[in-house]
Amino acid sequence: GDGSAYQVAQKQPMKLAAMEGLYEGGNGTGLVAIGLLNPDKTSYKDNVNPFIFDIKIPKLLSFLAERDVDAYVPGIVNLIEGGYTTNKGTVALSAAEKIEKGRIAIQALADYRKAVKDKDQVAAEQARSLLDENFAYFGYGYIKDPADLVPHVGLTFYSFRVMVLLGGYFILLFIVALIWSKKNKFARWLQGASLWTIPLAYIAGQAGWIVAEVGRQPWAIQDILPTGASVSKLATSSVQTTFFVFLFLFTVLLIAEIGIMVKAIKKGPSVN
């Protein structure tokens, strides 16, 4: 978890900001332990408080993001407007500047392809040099509005907390089960808790995927390819065929699994 948080902070800072409902960054930033987002907050541009209430663990987000309790962590507004000093000592570009560089990169790629087709080596080298210079922002060239760079904050924020809360519960349950197993005693309450925990594992997994996939929007490849430009030539019929094949196979497996489980339950536990 710590490693994942660090990687998100380094590679996907906008996702981290959405996970924390962080609009205005700062040094020594705290981690939101408990919080309720303000539904009146509809844009990073407005001056509405993002939280109705929140309780933060002081400086923990800075520590998780940069291994430094006093480190600067940018918020959504900072990432859009730029101008802050990054952990590499450079000044962050604004979204508008990245979009302009992205458009230059897209045009340079088109010019490079044309030059190669025309066998114009000089033009190809110039276009390639310009492309390499701006390639880090290639995907921004497809972005129409800087607001499109902000993922759904509410869904990312709450899904992250569901995932973490359930993860903490699982750890606690396993510790209790381990301690109780040492007593060599049967506990019906623990058996019941374990049974009802099964669906929670699926919920935690799905919450984690929501954080991963919603939080990274609009990117299919971070900074390089937005989802809006990720168009496949794969035929719709191919996708439908694959879907129904998997639907059939997993349905058969589900029926088989339920049958095996019911048989085992009817047989009951073996007594030594």
Image (cartoon, rainbow, N blue to C red):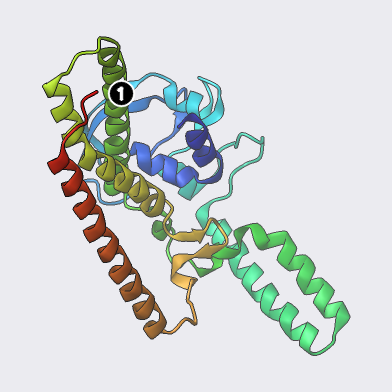
Residue 43 drawn above or below residue 16: below
Q: Which residue is mark 1?
A: 174
Q: Residue at x 36, y 80 (%)?
A: 241
Residue 209: x and y in percent read 36, 49
Q: What amino acid does circle 1 point to?
A: Phe
Percent position of residue 51, x then y: 24, 35
Left or right, 115 with respect to 141, comes to right
**Could you tell me if residue 136 is visible in this image?**
yes
Residue 133, image x, y percentages: 73, 60
Q: Is residue 223 above or below residue 67?
A: below
Number of on-image labels: 1
Left or right: residue 15 compared with residue 97: left
Quadrant of the image occupied by residue 91: top right
Question: Closer to the camera, 241 or 4?
Answer: 241
Extreme-top residue of the structure: 183
Please state if 134 lies on the left or on the right of 99 as rendered.
right
Q: Report crowding for label 1: few under 14, some 14 to 19, many 20 or more residues within 10 A (C-alpha).
A: few
Return the residue nearer the eye: 147 or 181: 181
